[in-house]
Every structure is written in structure tokens, then in C-alpha cells.
Amino acid sequence: MTSKIRLTMAQALARFLTRQMTEIDGEKVPLFGGVWAIFGHGNVAGMGEALYQVRRDLPTYRAHNEQAMVHAAVGFAKANFRRRMMAATTSIGPGATNMVTGAALAHVNRLPVLLLPGDVFATRIPDPVLQQVEDFGDGTVSANDCFRPVSRYFDRIARPEQIVPALARAMAVLTDPAECGPVTLSLCQDVQAEAFDYPESFFEERLWLPRRQRPDEHELQVAVEALRSAKAPLIVSGGGTLYSGASAALEVLAGKSGIPVTETQGGKSSLPDGNPLNMGAIGVTGTSAANQLAEKADVVLAVGTRFQDFTTGSWALFRNPDKTIIGLNVQPFDAFKHRALPLVADARVGLTELAEHLGGWAAPKAWTDKARKGKAEWRKAADAVTASTNAPLPSDAQVIGAVQRAMGDGIVLVHAAGGLPGELHKLWQADWPGSYHGEYGYSCMGYEIAGALGAKMARPDEEIVVMLGDGSYLMMNSEIATSVMLGLKLTIVLLDNRGFGCINRLQMATGGANFNNLLKDARHDMLPDIDFAKHAEGLGALSEHVSSIGDLEAALKRSRENDRTTVIVIDTDPLVSTDAGGHWWDVAVPEVSVRKEVNAARKAYEKNRQTQSVGD
């Protein structure tokens, strides 16, 4: 007879999580790095008591915002290249729905996180309970149904024994290279406290290792033949390269074949910036070196990328009418995009086998030489825009240059939405895999500090530097207090351009009037004079406001010696961005307007749309 143990559903869930393991660099470690929790009715009695019982094996971390909890968990998973992950639990109602944005971010970025929101009573006897959302036409609906479209797997646990198959499916999704993403187990609050006789085998230790799928022989042969026929081949490296641990394989293939490499936002740091075949960023926020090659490329090897519009210049970048795309991706959904020749495989295995089958083949020397020359020319342009300045309001690029010079190599740079992703994508010189941590799949303002907190938990010995604007800071800064509380030091560089400078520039570029983006252009009776340094100090951080690039570099060097999170604020120019590099992006401009600027922008828009490829 199978041995049984009587536990509540919540206790069984918590115990199960402590028994899931993985192996990193030959060392067995817990798969789950901990659970983020904000307790309320709906999880404090059930999950709260259960997590207390396992607190030594599965640490519980208290945050200040439920969305930020998910961001921190995502940052942890991303910094671990999806090899480890975290969970997050909330009360019902607003606590739960606050996590939906974080779930969407994880879904878009294909990152694992286990979401455990509390839910209504399965019995429905006390309905409607506090914070319950009622559907007039469907008695089975709760607020947690919002998680369905942004979860790779969703389940509502309405009986205690249901947690057994639900967790089996959850683990299969969370650890699958192709299906990876957020899992939501909606936990009815009465069921969390209900007991069941669980088989002890349910709690046996299990080791989860990454599955490395080999390519189909036919698909591999077709890809090899396409590359061998190429006169102007190009590699686009996406986030899948990093998640697969394929950087070394990519470097070998590029080195042997002479194929230039470009990087998406998710794939940046796949190769060291100093590699002469690394052309850097591609697409809307790309370098001139990368984009000039992309326009001419006849064979594009796309590795681990989902081909977001910023990568493809809204499909106006790859202009060679005879181009062939090879989609090397573990997920067939991505491998087949835009009529690509699919090469469904793990990135590391796929790159290794491509290099072996190509043998001594190499791209034409003239093409490789052109790439190297373009890289050298781009580096001169980048150095010019990031050089130190005495301007009273420096550009974002000049601040980036200061951070690069002052902090040097060996840091992890974290950023997300706004103008900084565009500037950092082309200008930041990443020197090792994972040293560039950008969230630009969902482009979510507010990810920066919370995501960096998770990255620090994953890489406690690394210097984590966050760059963000005042808009993102005002949206979500609460986890500064959490970082101080947990002793997880971050260095935060806050660029204050007094509004949403990036969208203001986009508004102007599409012919719009300056309206509702910069604070001065928004409806107001009095402009706020926000002292961000004092605010950060109030949250427990060390902070200072600097007035020049030179002062910023000095402050950054001092910050290395600080014992807790440090916030450095500098005022920047909201109207300046880097002209070098870049590419057109499809943002629809109104067909008619009383503004001549909009009508002129529409004409330019229609001209650019003629360069878009449709269906290929």
C-alpha cells in the first residue's frame, strides 16, 4: 500500500516546491529560489501557514507591490537563464489582479514564474466575499480569470486533490524550453485549508534539467544548403541564445564561417561587444553596422528570436527580395514565422551541428570585411555621442557613456521601457552573457527596480546597475525599500527629463503637438518640483543629485563602496536622442488632420510603408 501523508492543499503545494531541484555548474540546487508573498484574506491563513512551515527550505520574501513581486521573480528567472525560478502568492481581488501585468510580461518574454493568487470560496456559501468580482451571467468566473490569456497554463484548484495533476502540468510547462512561461494556479481560499491524504511519492525529490532538442536531419540539411549558397549571410541572435547557454557555440560558428552577428534586445550580450564580428544591435534601435548588413542580407539565420517589430524594422529592414530566413528556434511557432525555413532545435545544439555540417565553408571575404569595417565606423560614431560633456542638460547617451566609464566591465546593466532601451541597445558595450538585462518584450515601465532586485537575488556577487527615467521611477519605486530590507544592494541611475520624454519625441516625429507627455505640456495648475534624491532617501537608500557628467562619474565610483542601495539622480535633456543608427518603425499616422505637421508625417509614413514586406 502506498504511504500517505495528511496535509492541507497549501501545505502539500509548499512541500512539493521544496522538493524540486536543478543542477547548475555540476551543483544540485533548489529549482525555486523562494516565494514572494503579500498576504491578505484569501492566502494568509492557507498559504501563509504553509509557507511558514517550510520557511527554511523555501524562503518567503515580503514585497510592497504585487506587480513588483512578479517583476522580481521574472528578473530572477531571466538572470538565471530560466534555469531557476520563483513563485508569487497574493490575496484575492486587487492583490491578484495587480499581478496580471507581471504575468503578461513573463508571457511575452517566455520566462517562468509560478503565480498563486487566492480565489473565492469553492463552496460559494459565503459569496460574495470581500473583493469578489461577480459575473452576472457566469457563476464560475472570478477576477483570476484575467490570468487566462497571459498564462501558459491556468488551473483553478477547487478540491485539494486537484493540486497533484495541476502541479505536474505546471512543472512540465515551467521547465519546457518551448512552452516556458507563467503558470497560474488559482487557489480557492477554503480549499487551501482543506486536508487530503497525499501519497508520499508526490513529495519525492525530482531533478529538472534542460531538454536539448536536436534538429531534424532534413531541416538541418536544408539550412546547411541555404547557408552554403549565401553571398551575404547574417545571424540575428535573440534571447534564446542566452537561455540555451549557446554563446560559445555562436562564437565558434561565427568565427569559423565569418558570418556577422547582430543582436536583438533579448539577445544582446550573446557575444562580447569587442568581438569584431558582433555588429551589435539590429532594427529600430540598431547600429548602422548591423542595419546596413541586414538590408543586403540574402540568408538570415535567426537564432532564438520571436522577430518582434523592433528587430525587423516593422518588416521593412530585410530588403533583399531574394532573402531566405532560417528559423533556429526550440518553439515551432517562432521557427516558422515569415515563411522561414524551420530548424526546430535547442539553440546550442543547433548552432553546434550547423558549424559541424558547414565544415570549412566561409562567407565571402568581401562580405566579412565589409562587416568589420562597418563595426569600426560604428564604434567611432558611438564614442562621439557618449563622450563626456559640460552641457547643463546631458543626453541619455552621454549618461550611458559616463556609467560605462565609471563602472567598467563586470556589471549587470538592467533597464526596461522608455527612451533608454533604444539608446542602451545600440550604445552599451556588454562584455559577457547576461551582463545586459533588458525587458523590452513587454516594454513595461516599472520593471526596472523590481526586476533588478530579482537579478541581484540570482547574482548576489555581481554589481547590479539600474538605469531608468523619472516616469518609470514614479510608477514603481517601492522595491527600493525591499532591497534595503533584504540587504540587496542596487546602484540606480535616475535620469530626470521631467516627463515621458521618449513618447514626447515619438509624438513630435508623427506630427503631433507637444501634449500630455512632458509635465510642462500636461494639464496643471502648478508643476511639481520632485526631489527624487530625498524620496529615495526616505525609502532607506543612500542618494544624491549630481549636476554634471563629471560629478556623475565620481558619484558612481563612490557608490561601489556603499553598503546599501544607492540612487543617483541627474537631470537630462528630454528632446535629444542618438541620430546615428536606427531604422524606421511603423507607428500609424492619421490620414487626415488640421495640422500640417501631421499631414507631412503621413506622407513620409506612406512612403516608408512601401518598403515593408508582406507575407514573407
Image (cartoon, helix red, strand yellow):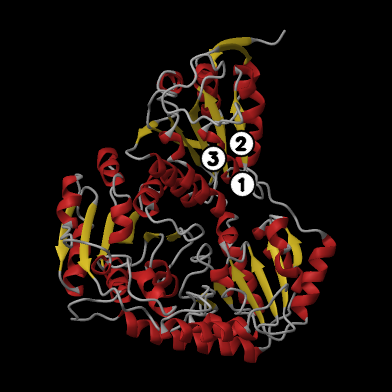
Q: Does any portion of residue 111 appear in the rendered image? A: yes
Residue at x-position 44% and y-position 23%: 42
* Disc number placed over residue 310 in the picture, else none: none
Q: Quadrant of the C terminus?
A: bottom right
Among numbered discs 3 and 2, the one appearing first in the sequence: 3
> Does any portion of residue 35 appear in the rendered image?
no
Q: Is residue 161 above or below residue 373?
A: above
Q: Residue at x 58, y 73 (%)?
A: 314
The type of residue carrying mark 3 is: Cys
Q: Residue furthest bottom?
A: 366
Disc number placed over residue 146 in the picture, else none: 3
Q: Are marks 1 and 2 in contact (CB under 8 Å)?
A: no
Of badges 3 and 1, the one in the foreground is: 3
| Label 1 crowd (10 A; few <14 / some 14-19 / many >=20) | many
Which residue was labeled with disc 1? 180
Q: Secondary structure at mark 3?
A: helix
Find the distance from the CA under tag 3 to the CA under tag 2: 10 Å
Between the residue at mark 3 and the residue at mark 1, the CA separation in whole angstroms equals 19 Å
Label 2 belongs to which residue?
154
Tell which circle, 1 or 2, labels the residue nearer the N-terminal end.
2
The three-letter amino acid code for the residue at tag 1 is Cys
